[in-house]
């Protein structure tokens, strides 16, 4: 296992290139199962989650090649419709092979993803959606078995749950519906940019999807799909994480290149409200130091509102921002492990019922801390950048699941970080 040692007192400057989106790439890779033809996907970030997805595709019989960000998948023949526990347990997003397998093979057998540190993550809405298309669903020996012997047929499907919309659930139903007979209407669809990117990919393959990016998606089923080339959208959460790094530790300002500023509106609004100067130039964003930084109250909600995947990083920012900030996560109310770790670094935070009340302290101080999930690890790296002393962050495999070379990118901006064997 590896750990990161982050030297505190960083002073960042210069520019960083943002990678392709992990959360857009994962369902797009799964969607390559829908055709026998070759798909070429560019800007796939080289992170362990995309590697797990490629392993699943290979295990199913697809031919996969990967060369510096470009992935080629040809799923001409599949040798089954089963995604085994050994692979699925490593990554919850494996669930998104269920829709494509069901559409192509008329059945799918996907291990039920277990619990996860950011909270209970049910898949009931995915299953409700696939049942709505005519699939039979049952759970057998820890696996979800979905079957549609007579094929899938379009229908009206409501995807809303008690925590709002579901991103991968919307993706799964959309991928199953593209080859269904007739028209499917998804009401209460997730509106995230990653859902739009998947719909664009599927439409290039020959699907007939309209309304992606709104809460009502209409899909007219087609007989077959073909191979395509596609470039994945920029990773808005990686970009957001670097924006917070700039807010916390820029000497003067830092620049992010290859971003899509329109996907970051809710975060940019909060950062500007807190006093950080932001400049937008096409696909480039610059963030500078705030003269008098302010805290904020924020609540995570489905897109276009504040993303849960930026909640932890904002807690790191607010930990040393004067005044009281209140951060509420309505999507994953248990996603606050990073706060317990930051308290070990001297942060003043009370957590209760999905809300963190953060009283900014002047400086955090280094302590050995443990990464618990992807975004929590990013928050700990951010906290460590400005802390006093050298912070050791253990279990960094969590950060490698979703950030491409985060330590090298931060070092490029002037941070001092070492990656060492435990
Ligand atoms: N939910 C249900 N039933 C379901 C599905 C979801 O109740 O069948 C609930 C969840 O428990 C949660 C809410 O609905 O309270 C939203 O979950 P969603 O299904 O949208 O999450 P997801 O699709 O599994 C994706 C991202 C997550 C991100 C969430 C929310 C990918 C691969 N993952 O997960 O990203 O937090 O949407 O935006 O796209 C991350 O990158 O660190 C990450 C966790």
Image (spheres, rainbow, N blue to C red):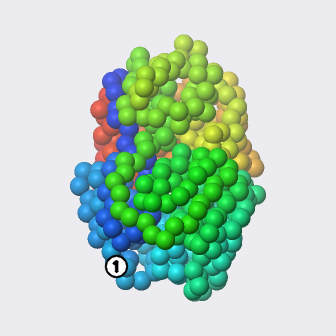
In the drawing, does residue 288 fall left or right of residue 145? left
Question: Residue 161's x, y, as percent?
Answer: 73, 59
Q: Examine the rendering and report whether any part of residue 422 can be seen.
A: no
Pick whichever, 298 or 201, lies toward us.
201
Q: Residue at x 43, y 72 (%)?
A: 87
Question: Residue 160's x, y, as percent?
Answer: 72, 58
Q: In the rendered image, which residue does mark 1 sit on?
A: 77
In the drawing, does residue 19 fall left or right of residue 324? left
Q: Residue at x 58, y 18 (%)?
A: 275
Disc 1, ligand 1: is the CB inside 8 Å? no
Q: Residue at x 53, y 76 (%)?
A: 102
Q: Residue furthest left?
A: 67
Q: Residue at x 31, y 57 (%)?
A: 40
Question: Residue 122's x, y, as percent?
Answer: 65, 66
Task: Give neighbour class at mark 1: few <14, some 14-19, many 20+ (Cα, 10 Å).
Answer: some
Pick whichever, 141 or 325, lies toward us.
141
In the drawing, does residue 89 fall left or right of residue 155? left
Image height check: is 31 above or below 5? below
Q: Examine the rendering and report whether any part of residue 232 can be seen.
A: yes
Labels in figure, total:
1
Q: Quadrant of residue 155?
A: bottom right
Q: Quadrant of the C terminus?
A: bottom left
Query: For the residue labelled by badge 1, is the local secondary structure a helix, a strand or a loop?
Result: loop
Question: Residue 59's x, y, as percent?
Answer: 36, 76
Image height check: is 173 above or below 310? below
Pick whichever, 339 or 76, lies toward us.
76
Q: Quadrant of the N terminus?
A: bottom left
Q: Quadrant of residue 225?
A: bottom left
């Amino acid at each position: 296992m590896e750990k990161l040692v982050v030297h505190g007192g960083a002073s960042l400057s210069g520019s960083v290139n943002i990678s392709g989106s992990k959360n857009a790439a994962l369902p797009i890779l799964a969607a390559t199962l829908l055709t026998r033809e070759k798909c070429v996907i560019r800007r796939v970030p080289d992170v362990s989650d995309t590697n797990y997805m490629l392993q699943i595709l290979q295990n199913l019989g697809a031919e996969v090649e990967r060369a510096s960000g470009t992935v080629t998948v040809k799923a001409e023949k599949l040798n089954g419709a089963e995604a085994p526990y050994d692979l699925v347990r490593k990554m919850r997003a494996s669930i998104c092979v269920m829709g494509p397998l069901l559409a192509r093979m008329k059945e799918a057998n996907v291990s039920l993803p277990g619990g996860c540190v950011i909270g209970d993550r049910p898949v009931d809405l995915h299953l409700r959606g696939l049942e709505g298309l005519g699939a039979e669903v049952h759970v057998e020996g820890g696996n979800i078995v979905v079957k549609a012997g007579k094929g899938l047929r379009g229908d009206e499907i409501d995807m809303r749950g008690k925590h709002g919309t579901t991103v991968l659930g919307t993706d799964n139903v959309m991928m199953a519906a593209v080859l269904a007979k007739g028209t499917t209407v998804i009401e209460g669809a997730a509106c995230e940019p990653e859902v739009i990117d998947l719909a664009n990919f599927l439409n290039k393959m020959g699907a007939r999807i309209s309304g992606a990016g709104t809460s009502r998606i209409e899909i007219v089923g087609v007989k077959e799909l073909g191979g395509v080339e596609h470039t994945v959208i920029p990773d808005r959460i990686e970009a957001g994480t670097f924006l917070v790094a700039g807010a916390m530790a820029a000497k003067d300002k830092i620049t992010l290149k290859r971003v899509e500023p329109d996907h970051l509106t809710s975060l940019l609004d909060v950062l500007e409200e807190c006093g950080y100067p932001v400049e937008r130039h096409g696909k480039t964003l610059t963030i500078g130091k705030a003269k008098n930084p302010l805290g904020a109250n924020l609540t995570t909600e489905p897109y276009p509102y504040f993303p849960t995947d930026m909640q932890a990083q904002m807690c790191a920012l607010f930990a040393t921002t004067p005044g009281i900030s209140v951060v509420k996560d309505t999507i994953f109310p248990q996603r606050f492990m990073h706060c317990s770790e930051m308290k070990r670094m001297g942060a003043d935070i009370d957590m209760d019922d999905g809300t963190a009340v953060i009283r900014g302290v002047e400086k955090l101080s280094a302590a050995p801390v443990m990464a618990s999930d992807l975004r929590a690890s990013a928050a700990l790296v951010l906290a460590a950048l400005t802390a006093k002393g050298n912070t050791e962050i253990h279990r960094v495999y969590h950060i490698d699941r979703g950030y491409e070379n985060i330590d090298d990118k931060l070092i490029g901006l002037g941070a001092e970080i070492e990656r060492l064997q435990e």
